[in-house]
Amino acid sequence: MKLKFLSLIKASLVAVIAGGLFVLAGCSDDDPATPKVPDPTETILQIVNGDPELSELAGYLEEFPDLSGLLGAAGTNTLFAPNNAAFESLYATPGFPEDPSDISLNLIKGVIAYHIVASKMLKDDLTPTGSGAGIATLYDNTDPCTGAKTNQVIKVNDNGTLLTGSTNNSIEILEADVLATNGVVHITKTVLIPPSVGNSLTPILGKLAATVLLGADFTTLAKVITIADCPITDVNMKITSILADPTGNTYTAFLPPNDVFSGTAALAGKTVDQLIAAYTPEQWRSILLNHIVAGTKTKADLTNGASFSTLLNPGVSNLTFADGTPGDPTADPTKSPVGKYVSSSGGATGLGGSANAPIYVADLVASNGVAHVVGQILFPN
C-alpha cells in the first residue's frame, strides 16, 4: 500500500510538472499574443530616411547637418516626426507661402529643432503637464531686441495629445514608440510649431510682413526691420505692424533683397554687418519708411513720371518712377527685367538718396497691398 501511495504521488508530481511546462511553453516568446519587441537596429535618422511617409521631414533634415548628425549619432533623443500629410496640411494654411523653398532657412531650422527632445521619452512618459513647464526641446527662441533666450516647450494634454504653438491644440500621435538605437520616434499628423513662432507669425500670414519676415531672400531686410523696431514702444508704430496692418489699410512696399545689401556693402568696402552698424536704429527707420507708400500701387500704376509720397514724410519724401530699357539683372544689376526704375527724393535726412533703382520683380500681391523687389536700398535724399 505504501508503495502504491508513493507511486500515486510521483504520478501527480509528473502531471503537475508536465502541466507547468505546458503553461510555460504557452507563454513563450514565440506566442503571437505576446510578441517580443525586437532590438532596434536603426538610428532615428535612418528610420526617417527609410520611411517614404516621412520624406518631407527627411528633406528638411538634409539642410541642417548639425540636426541630422545628432539624429544619426550615438546618444539618446526623442523625435516627434510629422508625416508628409502633416506638411501638406501646413502648406495649405491660408497665407502660407506658395513655395516652401522661399521660406527663411533660419525659421525652418528652429521649427525642426522644436521637434527634438534631448532624452528618450516613450509614450508612457508623455504624462499630462498641466500647468507645469512642459517638455524642453532643442529650440531656444532668442528675443531679437534683448538677446534673451527662452526654451520652447511641448505640453501634453490630459488626453495624451500635444499642445504647441500650432493652431491645432490637440495634436495626435499616429504611431508611438518607434524604437531606434539612439532613442525613439513618435509620428504625428501635425507639424509642431514653437509657441513663439505661432504667436508672431500666425497674425501676419498672407500680409506684406510675411513676405519679408518669412522670405529666404529678405533675411537681411528682416534683420534691419527688427533693429529699427526695437526702440519703438508703440507697437502700432513698428514697421512690422505697418506691414501687417489688420485694419483694412493697404500699402506698397519696395523690398531690397539680400544681394542688394551685400552688393551695397561691398561697394562701400564693408561687410553686411558693418553696413547695418553704420546707421542708427532711427536712421534705419527713416530708410525703411522711405520704402513704403500708402495704398496699393501695382506695376500698372508705376508709369513714367509717376510720383508717390512715402511714409517717411508724406508730401516731401517721394518715389518717382521712370520707364527704361529692360535688361537682365544677372548680367547687369542696374537693369530692370520689367523696364521700370525708381528714384528717391526729399526728406532732408542726409542719407544720400537713390537714383534709377531697377525694379527686379513687380506685383507680389498680399492681402494688405503689394510688394515690388528693387535693386537698390532706397535711401532718402
Image (spheres, grey):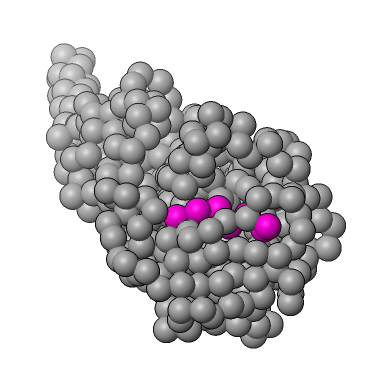
In which quadrant will I find the N terminus? top left
Specify whether residue 2 is painted magenta: no
Side of 82 relative to 167 (left or right): left
Q: Is residue 232 visible?
A: yes
The percent position of residue 267, horizontal first and vertical second, equals 50, 36
Q: Is residue 224 above or below residue 86?
A: above
In front of the other: 271 or 194: 271
Farthest residue to the right: give it. 233
Side of 116 relative to 35 (left or right): right
Q: Examine the image and state in which quarter residue 77 appears.
A: top left
Q: Is residue 113 above or below residue 343?
A: above
Residue found at x 55% / y 68% = 253
In front of the other: 184 or 219: 219
In which quadrant will I find the C terminus? bottom right
Residue found at x 74% / y 71% = 316
Q: Is residue 374 visible?
A: no
The percent position of residue 240, horizontal first and vertical second, equals 66, 62
The percent position of residue 228, horizontal first and vertical second, equals 72, 51
In front of the other: 137 or 250: 250
Farthest residue to the top: give it. 3
Q: Which residues are magenta?
A: 373-381
Q: Examine the image and state in which quarter residue 8 appears.
A: top left
Residue found at x 68% / y 35% = 277
Q: Examine the image and state in which quarter residue 201 appears.
A: bottom right
- What is the total number of numbered labels drawn onto the structure image? 0
Q: Is residue 230 above or below residue 297?
A: above
Characterize the magenta stretch by its predominant secondary structure: loop
Q: Is residue 199 above or below residue 73?
A: below
Residue found at x 50% / y 53% = 376
In front of the other: 166 or 62: 62
The percent position of residue 364, horizontal first and vertical second, equals 43, 71
